[in-house]
Structures are given as structure tokens and as C-alpha cells.
Amino acid sequence: MDSELRIAIIAGVFTILGASIPLIYSSITSPNETYWIDKGDYLSSINQYDAALECFEKAIMLDSKSELSWIKKSEALSNLGRFNASIQALDAALIINPKSDVAWCSRSYVFNQQGLYDEAIIAADKAIGIYPLSEDAWGNKGVALSYQDKNKEALNAFDEALNLNPRSSVTWYNKGVTLYRLGEYEDAFKAFNKSIELDPLWEGAWYGKGCALFKQGKYDEAIRAADESRVLDPRIPEFRYARDIAVAASK
């Protein structure tokens, strides 16, 4: 269950439909910074992170003082697993604007990815101090605290995030994981259920729901939840294992 903790991801500042790119930019002969950022965002949305990184680097070449371009470069590097380089890009963004809550929030996300939870909490607190309404910063802080087994504090952070956005399936899921770790299986079940209501196709939430039901001795319901997780992603062996355990317990 520990490996299932989902890390909140910072939403892109710009969004654009991929189909619109050739329509908008076909006549541009000298692409500007915005062009490269928008194109990079589109490429990131279809998981072409190397190509997206090239776009963000071109945006930086046009304006090396663009905080946004450095943050976007950091996101692409993080998606490529190049976490140290991602932090360096965020350092550049923070030199430009030391009070960028987005850059500090992104640092907390990357530090979580690296397992540097003390650093993640410091960065999240920086973001929250600048912009207390940052649900992502509260969510990232909760993840770091949960991995440090500071589960009560983690729940407080997740509740702050949910007060800001009660429709975040990720935060409800993370809250469910933390409640599960505390042995509060009925409340964990409710949190996983809420996550599923918001994102019915999230196999991890179905798996968490099944685990919480199993701990309450509700084996038939646990089997059904495990079946749902396996239908959504049959590649994950833990889903089959969870079902087999629930079936054995029900006999």
C-alpha cells in the first residue's frame, strides 16, 4: 500500500488543444516565447517530454528572464526523471522571482519524487507562506509528511487542500492512504470511495478501496473492488494478489 501514494502534480499555467496548434501557428515565421511554451505544453500532454524540453529551452533562449519558461523546463525534466536538473531550473526561476509560489510548489513536488521529504516540506511551506490558497502545495506537504509517518500532520495538510478543492481525486486518494496507515479503515474506505466518485477509472483508488474493505472483513466487497482494479489495469500483480487474498479469506 505504501508504494501507492500519489504525488500531486502542478498544473500547467497554459493549456492548448493539440489540434489547434497548426491552425494558430501555421503562418508564424518567427515563433516567439509564447509559441514555444504552448507547443511544449501540448507535447507534454501527449508524453513527448524530450520534444517538450526542447521547446522550453527555445523559449528560454528568446527570454532568459522568463520565470515561466524555467518552470516549464523543470516540469519536463522532472517528467524525464532528471530531478537534479529540474531543481536547477527551478533555482533559475527563483533567482528571477524569489516569491514565486509556483516555483516553490514545484520544488516540493520534485523533492518528493527524490524522497527528500524534509526539503519538500520546507519548499511547500515557502509556497504556502507566499500563497496560502495553493492546494498543490498543501497536497505536496501532506505527501511528504505521510512518507515520514507523520500521519496526523499529513491528514491536516490534505484537509487544507480539500478545503481549497474538494473535487481533487488525488487528494482524496492520498487521504485514504494516510487513514489506512493509521488503521482507520472505515474512513479510508470513504476517502477512496470519494476519489472513485471523482475519477471512476483510477485503478489505484479501487485497489485502496479493496484493501480498506478487506481490513474490515468485508471480503466479497473487497473482491469486487479488486476485480475493478484488475479490469482497469491487468498488468499490476498486486491487484491479482489482493484479490486472491480476499478470496482465500472469504472461504
Image (tube, grey):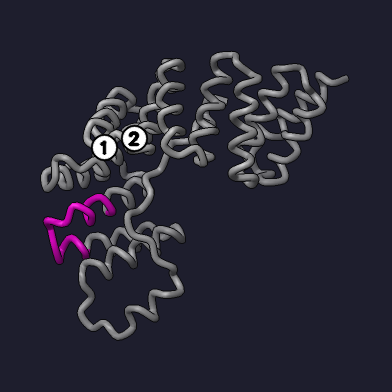
**Left or right of 40 in this view: 171:** right
Q: Amino acid at mark 1?
A: Tyr
Residue 4, position as x, y percentages in the image:
54, 31
Binning the other alpha carbons within 10 Å of mark 1 as few (below 14), some (14 to 19) or many (20 upward) gives some
Which is in the foreground here, disc 1 or disc 2?
Answer: 1
Range drawn in magenta: 58-72
Mark 1 / mark 2, whichever is N-terminal: 1
Is the stretch drawn in magenta largely helix, strand or loop?
helix
User: Rounded to the nearest whole Å, what is the CA distance between mark 1 and mark 2?
Assistant: 9 Å
Reply yes or no: does residue 89 show up in magenta: no
Residue depicted at x 50% and y 30%: 174
Residue depicted at x 28% and y 48%: 74
Binning the other alpha carbons within 10 Å of mark 2 as few (below 14), some (14 to 19) or many (20 upward) gives many
Whether residue 247 is situated above or below residue 201 in the rendered picture: above
Would residue 109 be visible to someone looking at this image? no
Q: Residue furthest front?
A: 163
Residue that carries the numbered disc 2 in the rendered image = 137
Figure quadrant of the N terminus = top right
Figure quadrant of the C terminus = top right
**Residue at disc 2, secondary structure:** helix
Q: Nearer the viewer, residue 98 or 164?
A: 164
**Residue at disc 1, secondary structure:** loop
Q: Amino acid at mark 2?
A: Ala
**Left or right of 227 in this view: 113:** left
Residue that carries the numbered disc 1 in the rendered image = 131
Residue 137, position as x, y percentages in the image:
34, 35
**Left or right of 52 in this view: 213:** right
Quarter of the image where one finds residue 217: top right
Residue depicted at x 78% and y 29%: 221
Residue depicted at x 26% and y 82%: 28
Q: Nearer the viewer, residue 241 or 43?
A: 43
